[in-house]
Image: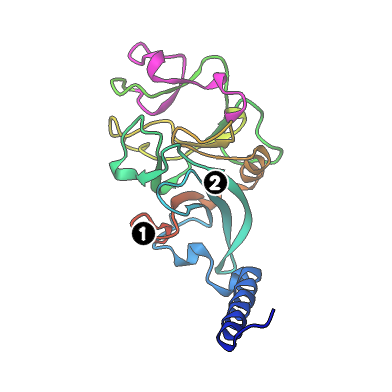
Amino acid sequence: MTLAPRTRVAVACAAVLACVAGTAAASPQAESPLPARMAGTGGGLQLITVEAAKTGSTTGTLTWWERRYGRWVRVGFAAARLGAHGLVEGTTRHQGTSTTPTGLYSLPFAFGISAAPAGAAYAYKRVTRTSWWCEDNASASYNRWVNGLPRDCAAAESEHLADYPTQYARAMVIGFNYTAPVRKRGAGIFLHVNGRGSTAGCVSVPADAMRRILAWADPAMRPHIAIGTTGGATAITGY
Protein backbone atom coordinates (compact mmCIF):
# COMPACT_ATOMS: atom_id res chain seq x y z
CA MET A 1 0.00 0.00 0.00
CA THR A 2 1.33 3.48 -0.90
CA LEU A 3 1.29 6.02 1.91
CA ALA A 4 0.47 9.69 1.44
CA PRO A 5 3.32 12.12 2.34
CA ARG A 6 1.64 13.18 5.63
CA THR A 7 1.11 9.54 6.58
CA ARG A 8 4.75 8.73 5.85
CA VAL A 9 5.85 11.56 8.18
CA ALA A 10 3.54 10.30 10.94
CA VAL A 11 4.89 6.78 10.59
CA ALA A 12 8.48 8.08 10.68
CA CYS A 13 7.77 10.08 13.86
CA ALA A 14 6.13 7.07 15.47
CA ALA A 15 9.19 4.98 14.63
CA VAL A 16 11.51 7.55 16.22
CA LEU A 17 9.37 7.73 19.38
CA ALA A 18 9.33 3.96 19.63
CA CYS A 19 13.10 3.91 19.27
CA VAL A 20 13.55 6.55 21.97
CA ALA A 21 11.12 4.74 24.28
CA GLY A 22 12.99 1.51 23.72
CA THR A 23 16.30 3.19 24.52
CA ALA A 24 14.89 4.69 27.71
CA ALA A 25 13.49 1.33 28.79
CA ALA A 26 16.84 -0.28 28.20
CA SER A 27 18.66 2.41 30.20
CA PRO A 28 16.88 2.73 33.58
CA GLN A 29 19.87 4.62 35.00
CA ALA A 30 19.27 7.48 32.51
CA GLU A 31 16.94 8.91 35.17
CA SER A 32 17.93 9.24 38.80
CA PRO A 33 16.94 6.18 40.88
CA LEU A 34 13.61 6.59 42.64
CA PRO A 35 15.10 6.95 46.17
CA ALA A 36 17.26 9.85 44.96
CA ARG A 37 14.09 11.67 43.85
CA MET A 38 12.24 11.18 47.14
CA ALA A 39 11.87 13.86 49.80
CA GLY A 40 12.98 11.37 52.46
CA THR A 41 14.03 7.74 52.73
CA GLY A 42 14.10 7.28 56.51
CA GLY A 43 17.78 8.04 56.91
CA GLY A 44 18.95 4.47 56.41
CA LEU A 45 21.06 2.80 53.76
CA GLN A 46 18.38 0.33 52.65
CA LEU A 47 14.94 1.12 51.27
CA ILE A 48 11.97 -0.81 49.89
CA THR A 49 9.68 1.10 47.51
CA VAL A 50 6.18 0.02 46.50
CA GLU A 51 4.87 1.97 43.52
CA ALA A 52 1.40 1.69 41.98
CA ALA A 53 0.06 3.42 38.88
CA LYS A 54 -2.81 5.15 40.74
CA THR A 55 -4.67 5.07 44.04
CA GLY A 56 -7.22 2.62 42.67
CA SER A 57 -4.55 0.09 41.72
CA THR A 58 -4.46 -3.30 43.38
CA THR A 59 -1.03 -4.18 41.99
CA GLY A 60 2.31 -2.43 41.72
CA THR A 61 6.05 -2.93 41.73
CA LEU A 62 8.13 -3.53 44.84
CA THR A 63 11.83 -2.70 44.56
CA TRP A 64 14.54 -3.00 47.17
CA TRP A 65 17.45 -0.58 47.10
CA GLU A 66 20.76 -0.12 48.86
CA ARG A 67 22.96 2.96 49.13
CA ARG A 68 26.48 2.17 47.96
CA TYR A 69 29.31 4.64 47.54
CA GLY A 70 26.95 7.59 47.73
CA ARG A 71 24.31 6.37 45.26
CA TRP A 72 21.18 4.22 45.37
CA VAL A 73 21.48 0.87 43.63
CA ARG A 74 18.58 -1.40 42.78
CA VAL A 75 19.11 -4.81 44.37
CA GLY A 76 15.93 -6.57 43.25
CA PHE A 77 12.29 -6.12 42.32
CA ALA A 78 9.05 -8.08 42.21
CA ALA A 79 5.41 -7.69 41.27
CA ALA A 80 3.38 -6.66 44.33
CA ARG A 81 -0.26 -7.06 45.29
CA LEU A 82 -2.02 -4.33 47.25
CA GLY A 83 -5.30 -3.74 49.02
CA ALA A 84 -8.49 -4.85 47.30
CA HIS A 85 -9.71 -1.24 47.40
CA GLY A 86 -6.43 0.33 46.33
CA LEU A 87 -4.32 2.83 48.24
CA VAL A 88 -5.14 5.69 50.59
CA GLU A 89 -3.12 8.29 52.47
CA GLY A 90 -1.97 6.64 55.70
CA THR A 91 -2.99 9.53 57.97
CA THR A 92 -6.61 9.37 56.80
CA ARG A 93 -7.01 5.61 56.53
CA HIS A 94 -9.83 3.77 58.33
CA GLN A 95 -9.62 0.21 59.62
CA GLY A 96 -11.48 -2.45 57.69
CA THR A 97 -11.40 -0.63 54.33
CA SER A 98 -9.01 -3.06 52.58
CA THR A 99 -6.81 -0.14 51.53
CA THR A 100 -3.03 -0.07 51.59
CA PRO A 101 -1.69 3.00 53.45
CA THR A 102 0.67 5.26 51.53
CA GLY A 103 3.65 6.82 53.27
CA LEU A 104 7.13 6.09 54.57
CA TYR A 105 7.34 3.51 57.37
CA SER A 106 9.82 1.64 59.51
CA LEU A 107 10.04 -2.16 59.49
CA PRO A 108 10.02 -3.10 63.21
CA PHE A 109 10.62 -6.85 62.88
CA ALA A 110 10.02 -9.93 60.75
CA PHE A 111 8.04 -13.06 61.56
CA GLY A 112 6.92 -16.29 60.03
CA ILE A 113 5.64 -19.82 60.31
CA SER A 114 8.73 -20.95 58.41
CA ALA A 115 12.24 -20.38 59.70
CA ALA A 116 14.08 -17.22 58.71
CA PRO A 117 16.17 -17.59 55.55
CA ALA A 118 19.76 -18.71 55.98
CA GLY A 119 21.98 -15.81 56.93
CA ALA A 120 19.12 -13.44 57.79
CA ALA A 121 20.09 -10.81 60.34
CA TYR A 122 16.70 -9.18 60.95
CA ALA A 123 14.85 -9.72 64.23
CA TYR A 124 12.57 -12.67 63.48
CA LYS A 125 9.72 -14.16 65.51
CA ARG A 126 8.47 -17.67 64.83
CA VAL A 127 4.71 -18.05 64.65
CA THR A 128 3.19 -20.66 66.98
CA ARG A 129 -0.37 -21.65 67.81
CA THR A 130 -0.43 -18.95 70.49
CA SER A 131 0.68 -16.11 68.17
CA TRP A 132 -1.89 -13.41 67.44
CA TRP A 133 -1.97 -9.89 66.06
CA CYS A 134 -4.39 -7.87 68.16
CA GLU A 135 -6.62 -5.61 66.07
CA ASP A 136 -9.27 -4.91 68.70
CA ASN A 137 -9.59 -1.12 69.05
CA ALA A 138 -10.61 -1.49 72.69
CA SER A 139 -7.51 -3.44 73.68
CA ALA A 140 -4.35 -2.13 75.31
CA SER A 141 -2.52 -4.42 72.87
CA TYR A 142 -4.03 -2.82 69.77
CA ASN A 143 -1.80 -3.29 66.71
CA ARG A 144 0.64 -5.53 68.53
CA TRP A 145 1.94 -9.11 68.36
CA VAL A 146 0.77 -11.08 71.37
CA ASN A 147 1.53 -14.62 72.49
CA GLY A 148 -1.72 -15.73 74.02
CA LEU A 149 -4.72 -13.51 73.41
CA PRO A 150 -5.23 -10.93 76.20
CA ARG A 151 -8.64 -10.82 77.86
CA ASP A 152 -9.34 -7.37 76.46
CA CYS A 153 -8.59 -8.44 72.87
CA ALA A 154 -11.45 -10.21 71.10
CA ALA A 155 -10.46 -13.09 68.82
CA ALA A 156 -13.02 -11.96 66.26
CA GLU A 157 -11.21 -8.62 66.06
CA SER A 158 -7.73 -10.12 65.65
CA GLU A 159 -5.62 -12.34 63.42
CA HIS A 160 -4.54 -15.80 64.51
CA LEU A 161 -1.29 -15.80 62.56
CA ALA A 162 -0.96 -19.57 62.31
CA ASP A 163 -4.20 -19.69 60.31
CA TYR A 164 -2.40 -18.19 57.29
CA PRO A 165 0.36 -20.70 56.46
CA THR A 166 0.87 -19.34 52.94
CA GLN A 167 0.77 -15.59 53.55
CA TYR A 168 2.64 -15.68 56.84
CA ALA A 169 5.19 -18.28 55.91
CA ARG A 170 7.49 -15.25 56.07
CA ALA A 171 6.60 -11.60 56.61
CA MET A 172 7.77 -8.21 57.87
CA VAL A 173 5.78 -5.80 60.01
CA ILE A 174 5.18 -2.46 58.27
CA GLY A 175 5.32 0.26 60.91
CA PHE A 176 2.04 1.88 59.89
CA ASN A 177 0.15 3.16 62.97
CA TYR A 178 2.64 1.25 65.09
CA THR A 179 4.70 3.58 67.29
CA ALA A 180 1.72 5.44 68.74
CA PRO A 181 -1.37 3.60 67.48
CA VAL A 182 -4.44 5.68 66.62
CA ARG A 183 -7.63 3.69 67.23
CA LYS A 184 -9.64 2.74 64.16
CA ARG A 185 -6.86 3.78 61.77
CA GLY A 186 -5.76 0.24 61.12
CA ALA A 187 -3.70 -2.63 62.41
CA GLY A 188 -1.81 -5.61 61.08
CA ILE A 189 -0.26 -4.10 57.94
CA PHE A 190 2.51 -6.41 56.75
CA LEU A 191 4.76 -7.22 53.83
CA HIS A 192 4.08 -10.91 53.27
CA VAL A 193 3.86 -13.76 50.78
CA ASN A 194 1.13 -13.69 48.14
CA GLY A 195 -2.19 -15.33 48.86
CA ARG A 196 -4.85 -15.92 46.21
CA GLY A 197 -5.42 -12.31 45.23
CA SER A 198 -5.47 -8.75 46.52
CA THR A 199 -4.84 -8.09 50.21
CA ALA A 200 -6.85 -6.57 53.04
CA GLY A 201 -4.40 -3.65 53.11
CA CYS A 202 -1.02 -5.35 53.25
CA VAL A 203 1.63 -5.58 50.53
CA SER A 204 2.34 -9.07 49.22
CA VAL A 205 4.99 -10.55 46.92
CA PRO A 206 5.95 -14.01 45.66
CA ALA A 207 7.51 -16.35 48.22
CA ASP A 208 10.97 -16.24 46.65
CA ALA A 209 10.98 -12.43 46.68
CA MET A 210 10.03 -12.44 50.37
CA ARG A 211 12.86 -14.86 51.10
CA ARG A 212 15.34 -12.69 49.23
CA ILE A 213 14.21 -9.52 50.99
CA LEU A 214 14.61 -11.11 54.42
CA ALA A 215 18.05 -12.46 53.53
CA TRP A 216 19.06 -8.98 52.35
CA ALA A 217 17.55 -6.74 55.05
CA ASP A 218 20.15 -5.55 57.55
CA PRO A 219 18.95 -3.85 60.76
CA ALA A 220 22.26 -1.97 60.97
CA MET A 221 21.33 -0.26 57.69
CA ARG A 222 17.91 0.85 59.06
CA PRO A 223 15.65 -0.18 56.16
CA HIS A 224 12.30 1.54 55.59
CA ILE A 225 9.43 1.01 53.19
CA ALA A 226 7.81 3.74 51.08
CA ILE A 227 4.40 3.13 49.50
CA GLY A 228 2.83 5.43 46.91
CA THR A 229 1.80 6.09 43.33
CA THR A 230 3.72 7.26 40.28
CA GLY A 231 2.00 10.65 40.41
CA GLY A 232 -0.68 12.74 42.09
CA ALA A 233 -1.29 13.47 45.77
CA THR A 234 0.14 10.14 46.91
CA ALA A 235 3.20 10.24 44.64
CA ILE A 236 5.98 8.24 46.22
CA THR A 237 8.51 11.00 45.53
CA GLY A 238 6.66 13.24 47.95
CA TYR A 239 7.54 11.17 51.01
Q: Spatial distance from mark 1 to mark 2, Cα to Cα?
A: 32 Å
User: In the image, what residue type sits under mark 2?
Assistant: Pro
Q: In this orientation, which residue lies closer to the viewer: 211 or 83?
A: 83
Q: In this orientation, which residue lies closer to the viewer: 193 or 35?
A: 193
Residue found at x 29% / y 30%: 184
Q: Earlier in the sequence, mark 1 or mark 2?
A: 2
How is this picture coloured?
A: rainbow
Magenta highlight on residue 158: yes
Residue found at x 54% / y 46%: 219
Q: Position of residue 196 (x, y in %)?
A: 58, 31
Number of numbered markers: 2
Q: Specify the farthest residue to the front.
A: 1
Magenta highlight on residue 195: no
Task: Decide: is 236 above or below 8.
Answer: above
Lateral position of residue 2 relative to residue 45, left or right: right
Residue position for label 2 = 219
Lateral position of residue 18 relative to residue 135, left or right: right
The C terminus: image quadrant:
bottom left
Give the number of the mark in front: 1 or 2.
1
The 10 Å Cα crowd at callout 2, few under 14, some 14 to 19, many 20 or more, is some
Q: Position of residue 188 (x, y in %)?
A: 43, 31
The span picked out in magenta is 141-167
The N terminus: image quadrant:
bottom right
Residue found at x 63% / y 78%: 15
SS type, badge 1: loop
SS type, badge 2: helix
Residue 232 is tagged as: 1
